[in-house]
Amino acid sequence: MSFKSKQLNRLGLVQAAAAIEQREISSVALLQACLDRIEERNAEVAAFVAYDSKKALAAAAEADNNTQLGPLRGIPFAVKDILDTADYPTEYGSPIYQGHQPHQDAVCVRLAKSRGAVLLGKVATGEFATQTPSKAKNPLNLAHTPGGSSSGSAAAVGDYMVPVAYATQTTGSIIRPAVFCGVVGYKPTFDLISPAGMKDLSPSQDTVGIITRSIEDAAFFTLGLHGAATVRTASLKPRVALCLSRQWDYVLPETMRAIESLVHHLESAGCTVKRTWLPDEYDTLLAIQPRLFMYEARHALVNERILHGDQLSHRLQTRLQLGEHIEYDEYVSMRQQVREAQQKVETLFKGVDAVLYPAAAGEADEGLASAGDPRFGALWTLLHLPSVSFPIDLGPKGLPLGVQMIARYGQDTRLLAVANAVTSIIGPVGPEVSG
């Protein structure tokens, strides 16, 4: 296969890694194509907040010269600016940390480098990975939000600036932005990717994940971090439970129709789909999740709150103030209820490989003042379960509608295999970004 230089930034991870290994392309050429795209589009999209062409190209040249590096050799990746990097400032989306330079990488960043991946730069985050939006825009329509708080990660991958980016999720900050920008968001089982070197927000929920352009690429990168290889399993006939809940009251009709259409496609392809109702006891957890967040965030951001409170956004100040009214006994009780639910959640997956659930109410919201409603990721993040989101159709404004699939604790490989099979059945979903 021949590759044109201007098309290299559009290669997926699996395809790019194979081409580098077979010397059909170089990591330098791939990295340069990504840099060219950044130069072309970042002034509008505002996905990257820091990058250094010389530094990145030098690392790519080293990858080309060292064939003994790991399975991610030569693959460019970006890092959400909530994760520490020794090569670039880490500002956590806040003016409090302007120019802040960590002395070492977050563990996930160092691990990717050790497997041969090339750090391209830092991408935008909402303030301390909260709902206060960054300056990033949706590459599919610049007048719409890219979601939050992993806005820069989703926008950079969706705009073909980089094939993979680290992201984080405390409520819905991977699942939602990925769908809004027409790409894939993968939130692993809690702690599968180490959070060491990430700015804490709600430590009982904060999860490091990735955003890519395909399920196969998400599996390739994540397994590559662990030194393992991806096994293609698109021939699976998934067994899926469509999980209904009171949260569906917030789902727009176009999303409901898209999910019903997906169910029809799956059943026509020989997959098993059953409908189930989320047990009432989990409604209590949905009420707990924001209060648990407010309590933990108030503690995690104690220095910022006390020493630099005037530099926090009004939105974040309000949420932290609400946490002041949550007593210690309530916090411990909430943690106990969550723990009990984590131990019982296995019943949701009886007889199925994964649960199907909305990823967002509808298309990306118009305007940039809000990052959208994160509610649909809250329960699964709280339960520490792996989830992956992807687009399934286009809405009335021509932007993606999406779903997420959730699996048992620790069943990440199975989840990605099942999701890969599902996306193989439905095929690609537009729209395309320009260029």
Image: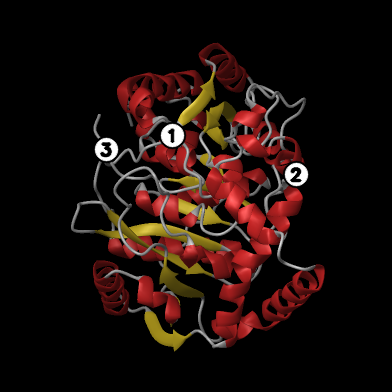
The residue that label 1 is drawn on is 135
Q: Residue at x 36, y 23 (%)?
A: 43
| Residue situated furthest top in the rendering | 54
Q: CA distance from mark 1 to mark 3?
A: 19 Å
Quarter of the image for the N terminus: give it.
Answer: top left
Where residue 254 sits: x, y (%)? 24, 67
Where residue 101 sits: x, y (%)? 70, 23
Q: Is residue 135 visible?
A: yes
Q: Is residue 37 above or below residue 371?
A: above
Disc 1 and disc 3 in contact, CB within 8 angstroms:
no
**Mark 1 or mark 2: which comes first in sequence?**
1
Q: What amino acid is labelled 1 in the image? A: Lys
Say whether residue 325 is left or right of residue 400.
Answer: right
Q: Which of the 4 quarters of the picture holds residue 25?
A: top left
The residue that label 2 is drawn on is 196
Q: What amino acid is labelled 3 in the image? A: Val
Labelled disc at residue 433: 3
